[in-house]
Image (cartoon, helix red, strand yellow):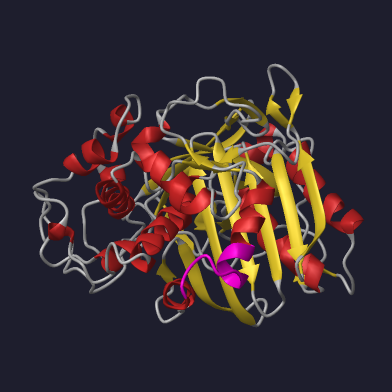
């Protein structure tokens, strides 16, 4: 299931347990914090923390290939999903700096057949305010992932489809199609395939030797993690194989944590981009753009730049706090969005801010408690799936949530009536009436009401 939403700029401490504040950095404390996520099979990968230009913590966890018992290491490379947009944006800005193109150029200057091409600018694409229909929302998108694609074939999927809104007027959701289009513009301006162009424009000049664009040509990739997805409450299985070329521009980059940290240094403190291009990325007047969430973070009391990604078998997160000169990178080859919570909490731990540890219930709740949670709950029009009815069902293996799409999320028990959705890492709380029956379901910031019992 693809919940069509953009990730939150700030994180919420979801889990039971006393708040902890660290007066000083402690590698042991970070490791202890991460362990429950690893033990519950919700994180495997690499975590890196850099402060004042020095790596103060890096450790790899779990397996890059579980079947062959190949461990994740600090050299392991991970697909980073939507974090890829940062590199597509950087390639475009390198072309702008060279005079090959302008942020105010229109899509119609390069590509025909796109509705509104005479209105949509390169800047609109980069800031995800283009109004283009989203390729990820097309009914045949899952089939598209099973075949090799190019930026041209991806853009062709939205040709002739009407705009969702006037270009430049607003941000609605993550615009995968906009970044497919940027990849095609890069190809047209450089005369190179997208993967080769990004290598030439970004990876090579910035010294990112462990990074690349997956265009399906990697037959035996070295040190590449294999992706896994949750099964039930604590299990894992190999994620379905996809053609990463079907995510060109928006989610096809792979990298290692060390390379991601070097990229952050090059972007925020280096000179590989012009001052104007760097300003365009760092400008916080728009909270989304150039592959970043940008703005004041209340938790840390300072401007923060962050991004996360989620694609079959992988999740990723990066946070940069310029005032604290801190970078946190969390790359995982498990399809669980815990990386965002992990990244924010590790930043808090390292800076002496409060955070909460993850305490999962083991053994899981008994069948009587789980059966007492079952029911159908109706959410409003502002929910991720508008006006959705979701059902909680208890079986021998635990509690699950069924969405209208038919997709099922396993719920990890934290305490009685308190869970976390394992796939999307949202807090789930059951509220009861005076008779003890479920009356409401809190899912993150949303509340669903129980359907009438027959």
| Residue stretch rendered in magenta on the structure | 265-274
**Toward the viewer: 244 or 93?**
93
Residue 87 to residue 233: above or below = below
User: Is 359 or 190 nearer to us in this picture?
Assistant: 190
Q: Please say whether residue 77 is visible from this viewpoint.
A: yes
Q: Which residue is at 41% across, 40% downward?
A: 195
Examine the rendered structure and indicate whether residue 453 appears above or below residue 11.
Answer: above
Q: Residue furthest top?
A: 68
- Residue depicted at 42% across the width and 64% down the height: 290
Quarter containing the C terminus: top left
Residue 210 in magenta stretch: no
* Residue nearer the viewer, 49 or 280: 280
Q: Which of the 4 image quadrants contains residue 431?
A: bottom right
- The picture places residue 116, in percent across and down from the top left corner, at 11, 61
Q: What is the quadrant of residue 69 in the picture?
A: top right
- Identify which residue is drawn at 53% across, 45% down: 80
Q: Is residue 351 left or right of residue 239?
A: right
Q: Position of residue 197 (x, y in %)?
A: 39, 45
Q: Quadrant of the N terminus?
A: top left
Q: Position of residue 65 (x, y in %)?
A: 67, 24
Q: Position of residue 74 (x, y in %)?
A: 75, 41
- Extreme residue in the front direction: 98
- At 26% from the left edge and 44% from the top edge, which residue is drawn? 135
Q: Is residue 183 above or below residue 100?
A: above
Is 271 a magenta residue? yes
């Amino acid at each position: 299931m693809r919940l069509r939403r953009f990730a939150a700029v700030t994180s919420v401490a979801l889990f039971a347990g006393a708040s902890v504040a660290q007066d000083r950095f402690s590698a042991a404390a970070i490791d202890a914090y991460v362990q429950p996520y690893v033990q519950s099979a919700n994180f495997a990968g690499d975590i890196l923390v850099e402060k004042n230009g020095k790596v103060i913590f890096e450790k790899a966890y779990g397996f890059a290939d579980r079947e062959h018992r190949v461990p994740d290491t600090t050299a392991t490379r991970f697909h980073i999903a939507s974090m890829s947009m940062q590199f597509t944006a950087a390639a475009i800005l390198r072309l702008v700096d060279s005079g090959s193109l302008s942020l105010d150029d229109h899509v119609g200057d390069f590509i025909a057949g796109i509705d509104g091409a005479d209105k949509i600018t390169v800047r609109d694409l980069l800031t995800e305010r283009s109004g283009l229909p989203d390729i990820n929302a097309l009914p045949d998108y899952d089939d598209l992932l099973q075949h090799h694609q190019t930026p041209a074939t991806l853009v062709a999927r939205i040709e002739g489809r009407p705009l969702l809104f006037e270009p430049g007027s607003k941000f609605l959701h993550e615009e995968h199609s906009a970044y497919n289009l940027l990849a095609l513009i890069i190809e047209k301006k450089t005369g190179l395939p997208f993967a080769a162009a990004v290598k030439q424009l970004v990876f090579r000049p910035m010294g990112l030797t462990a990074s690349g664009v997956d265009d399906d040509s990697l037959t035996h990739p070295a040190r590449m993690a294999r992706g896994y997805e949750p099964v039930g409450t604590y299990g894992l299985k190999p994620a379905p194989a996809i053609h990463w070329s079907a995510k060109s521009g928006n989610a096809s980059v792979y990298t290692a944590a060390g390379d991601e940290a070097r990229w952050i240094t090059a972007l925020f403190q280096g000179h590989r981009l012009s001052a104007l291009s760097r300003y365009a990325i760092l400008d916080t007047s728009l909270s989304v753009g150039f592959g970043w969430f940008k703005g004041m973070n209340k938790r840390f009391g300072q401007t923060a730049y962050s991004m996360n990604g989620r694609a079959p078998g992988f999740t990723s997160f990066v946070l940069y706090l310029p005032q604290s000169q801190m970078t946190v990178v969390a790359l995982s080859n498990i399809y669980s969005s815990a990386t965002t919570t992990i990244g924010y909490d590790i930043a808090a731990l390292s800076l002496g801010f409060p955070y909460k540890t993850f305490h999962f219930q083991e053994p899981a709740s008994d069948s009587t408690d789980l059966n007492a949670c079952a029911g159908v709950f109706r959410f409003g029009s502002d929910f991720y799936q508008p006006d959705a009815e979701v059902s909680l069902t208890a079986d021998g293996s635990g509690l699950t949530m069924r969405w209208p799409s038919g997709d099922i999320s396993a719920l990890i028990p934290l305490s009685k009536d308190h869970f976390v959705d394992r796939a999307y890492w949202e807090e789930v709380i059951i509220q009861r009436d005076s008779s003890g029956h479920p009356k409401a379901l809190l899912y993150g910031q949303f509340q669903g009401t129980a359907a009438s019992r027959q």
